[in-house]
């Protein structure tokens, strides 16, 4: 008997009704994988091909936790940076007075005061390092007094990591995160190093050229930064996402090998913004909160992240249950919002079916 049949059918229906062009779904518990299925085609163009488990997707803001957050945690583990370290020390330079007390902790929890987003291409020339611009940009609120999910804070964080290590962000992510987890098809894609588009999901049309974005990052700021940014830019497939999320389900352990110390991992997934619109840990979004994507899912400690192009993942640290959904809902246009409902419907269904399969895991009422 197929596991999680209702969850599979839901995603299949979304694709068959053309609410999204394609999807790749994975559901597992710890090291055991129960579902890995793909649906649909890479695009609505004449070049479309059927997606498979190796099809690459622009994972957008999943980059924040797959690359930037993981790199920050690895540097913390190696005593190369600290959560209470402030911007002047992190950048080894003078910063404007309103930003002198911003900490790594605040950048990771989206409480550093930065606006949600500003289009860098409107203010900077191509090839310009955005650090000085971001440091001189007026804050939206006093650091530590509010929580606004901010691409700008993570763009700056990416630059901090580069400066602290003296190495490019894409190289750091490859060598410190993706290679150790054997994620061999996950990487940033610099604009001057195009990939084979034949098994890559399309997103939108390039707002500069009008051509389809396929293998080039959809996010305008990451595109401006040559495809490599702390907020977006990573491409991955469902095979590699399974490796990543199973590590998270294992509390930082992958296939019996420690990737992150348990104490540091647990600190990353605690709620540091109670009462805010989103429950945020270090990089991760936690279940619950008025803007949560998690539906009636798992237990209150579940955590994950979403991406603008459509993908999301969610993990229960208590039961080890995880779900990953990759999709390219922004093809052909970002006006398609169907993924917002799909996430909540899917996560609720996965929770229900998990409790039917493993009733003892739900006896305390933690699951729906």
Image (cartoon, rainbow, N blue to C red):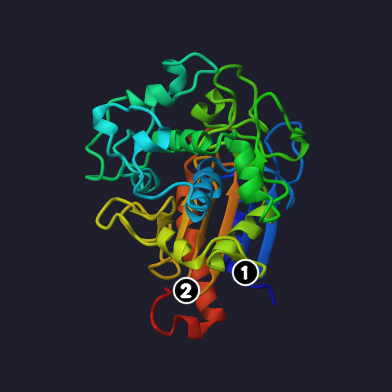
Judge from the rendering whether residue 189 lies leftward or rightward of residue 261; answer left or right: right
* Distance of label 2 from label 1 (alpha carbons): 23 Å
Callout 2 crowding tier (Cα within 10 Å): few <14, some 14–19, many ≥20: some
Give the structural element (helix, strand or loop) at label 2: loop
Q: Which residue is mark 1?
A: 5
* Residue 211, picture quadrant: top right
Q: 177 or 283, which lies in front? A: 177
At 73% from the left and 53% from the top, the residue drawn is 53
- Can you tell which mark lies on residue 135? none
- For residue 282, above or below residue 9: above
Question: Is 328 located above or below residue 316 in the figure?
Answer: above
Which label belongs to residue 318? 2
Q: In which quadrant will I find the C terminus?
A: bottom left
Instruction: Count up the numbered dots.
Output: 2
Residue closest to the eye, 75 or 42: 75
Tell me if label 2 and label 1 are in contact, CB under 8 Å. no
Position of residue 162 measured from the top left corner of the image (x, y, whole percent): 53, 35
- Residue 328 shown left or right of residue 276 in the figure: right
> Residue 309's spot in the image, x, y percent?
54, 40
Give the quarter of the figure containing the N terminus.
Answer: bottom right
Q: Nearer the viewer, residue 71 or 280?
A: 71
Residue 279: % across, % down: 34, 55
Q: Residues within 10 Å of mark 1 (few under 14, many from 20)?
A: few
In the rendered image, the vertical position of residue 324 relative to residue 64, given as above or below:
below
SS state under label 1: helix
Q: Is residue 21 visible?
A: no
Q: Is residue 55 left or right of residue 319?
A: right
User: Which badge, 2 or 1, is on the more N-terminal residue?
Assistant: 1
């Amino acid at each position: 008997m197929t596991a999680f049949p209702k969850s599979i059918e839901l995603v299949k229906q979304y694709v068959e009704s053309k609410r999204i062009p394609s999807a790749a779904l994975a559901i597992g518990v710890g090291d055991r994988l129960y579902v890995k299925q793909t649906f649909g085609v890479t695009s609505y163009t004449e070049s479309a091909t059927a997606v498979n488990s190796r099809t690459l997707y622009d994972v957008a803001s999943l980059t924040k936790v797959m690359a930037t957050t993981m790199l920050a945690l690895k540097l913390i583990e190696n005593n190369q940076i600290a959560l209470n370290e402030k911007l002047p020390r992190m950048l080894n330079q003078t910063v404007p007075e309103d930003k002198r007390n911003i900490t790594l902790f605040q950048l990771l929890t989206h409480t550093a005061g930065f606006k949600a987003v500003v289009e860098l291409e409107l203010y900077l020339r191509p090839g310009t390092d955005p650090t000085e611009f971001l440091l001189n940009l007026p804050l939206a609120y006093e650091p530590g007094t509010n929580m606004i999910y901010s691409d700008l804070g993570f763009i700056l964080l990416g630059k901090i990591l580069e400066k602290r290590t003296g190495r490019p962000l894409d190289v750091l992510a490859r060598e410190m995160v993706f290679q150790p987890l054997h994620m061999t098809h996950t990487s940033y894609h610099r604009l001057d190093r195009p990939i084979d588009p034949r098994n890559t999901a399309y997103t939108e049309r390039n707002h500069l050229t009008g051509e389809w974005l396929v293998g080039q990052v959809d996010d305008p700021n990451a595109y401006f930064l040559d495809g490599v940014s702390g907020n977006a830019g990573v491409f991955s497939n469902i095979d590699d996402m399974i490796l990543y999320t199973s590590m998270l389900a294992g509390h930082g352990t992958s296939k019996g090998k420690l990737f992150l110390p348990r104490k540091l991992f647990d600190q990353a997934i605690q709620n540091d913004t109670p009462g805010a619109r989103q429950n945020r840990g270090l990089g991760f979004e936690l279940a619950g909160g008025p803007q949560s994507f998690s539906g009636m899912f798992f237990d209150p400690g579940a955590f994950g992240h979403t991406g603008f192009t459509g993908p999301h993942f969610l993990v229960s640290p208590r039961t080890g249950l995880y779900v990953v959904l990759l999709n390219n809902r922004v093809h052909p246009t970002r006006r398609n919002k169907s993924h917002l409902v799909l996430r909540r419907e899917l996560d609720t269904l996965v929770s229900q079916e998990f409790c039917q399969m493993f009733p003892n895991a739900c006896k305390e009422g933690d699951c729906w």
